[in-house]
Image (cartoon, rainbow, N blue to C red):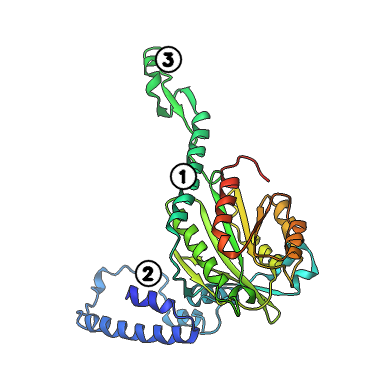
Amino acid sequence: YTQPLKRIATIPELQQRINNRIELYREFWSKLWEELSQWEIVQPDIEIVPDSDTPVQVSSVEQQTPELGSIDPDLANEISWILEEGEVDLTHEILEAVQDPAAKSLETYLKKGSIVMDPRPDTAQVNRLRRIFKEHVSQVRRAKNRNTRRGLQEGKLDPRRLYRVPIDGKTFKSKQAPGFEDLWQICLVADASASMAGRGQNMRPWRIAERAFATVIQAAREFRNRIEIYGYYGESGNCTLTQLFHGKQLYSLKPKGVTPSGQAIMAVASLLDRKYKKNMIIHITDGAPNSGLPLKKAVDYCQSKGIQVFTIGCGCTPFTQHFLKESFPPGCVYLMKGIENLSEGLETLFKQRILSHELP
């Protein structure tokens, strides 16, 4: 039943997922009961059951069982999030982080993507990105080798110092293993407002962006860096942030609404796994933000927390280009002629930043 459950998880409508799961569980239980009903019921030997000084009263245990609907609200929310890809409210975390009333102008929610993404990655681009990630691994190894301590009493055997066995026994070395301080946590945060749907155009910007996402995920699979992908839009007074990569599967969404860029970047910053020492948020957009927290406020917050933050502007107007340059630090704005150049922009950014030893 694993494959049917996976197929049901891809159905976009919540109620349809619920109904399909109910039918599947009923079918499963029916077959399981056919087997269980044949089992022999064995009564335990009363003589071998140990005596208890405090016998359990069944009635008292039953009284302690919580009734349906009495579950702790926080636990209920977590169960809803896990089982039904529900929403998590991030508004309070954002407001507490920046202490700006503008952060509350849009309620901000995180949800998991449920529409499976189908674009195929660009094979040539995958190979180029893999070379970048592979070179990063080599850089880390070379740095570790330079920091190797030799002539120790214990550790890993050092073949080059075996001659010291009869002298002082200092034939061991110690080399620090790669850890989270060497790995990158990279978050792509993509503008999924109405303009990305490409209304009235033959080109569909969001479809091109999806292929770039698939390319990055394919290139990074064999490496230990953490890749997160989110899409966001604003609608009806809310900012919705959708996690597009989870469970080793890429998902998509339907672009719509306005562009609360600052709100989305702050939300992603609050979700970062703090055990990673190298964090990078890459914001992708085709226009200027028009709602929610001021973009510069979010960028300044990320910088204050040691989070590298960049933006890739695809086909932006001169006004938007100027606005992005004013909102981000120098050297952190990458401007592409159009969305079709997004993959090249990501490759350039990765090459310059991941392989660099200096922070921007």
**Residue 137 visible (yes or no):** yes
Could you tell whether 108 is left or right of 59 in the image?
right
Q: CA distance from mark 1 to mark 2?
A: 63 Å
CB atoms at circles 3 and 2 under 8 Å apart?
A: no
C-alpha span from label 3 to label 2: 64 Å
Determine the secondary structure under disc 1: helix
Q: Is residue 337 above or below residue 68?
A: above
Note whether residue 240 is visible.
no
Report the residue marked by disc 2. 52
First in sequence, mark 1 or 3: give its number.
1
Residue 147, compared with residue 312, is above or below; it is above
Is 135 in front, or is 79? 135
Residue linked to disc 1: 134
Q: Position of residue 285 (x, y in %)?
A: 65, 65
Q: Amino acid at mark 3?
A: Asp
| Helix, strand or loop under label 3 | loop
Which residue does the image show at 47% across and 67% down from the upper left? 250
- Cα–Cα span, label 1 and label 3: 39 Å
Q: Residue at x 51, y 39 (%)?
A: 140
The residue at which mark 3 appears reads as 168
User: Label 1 amino acid?
Assistant: Lys
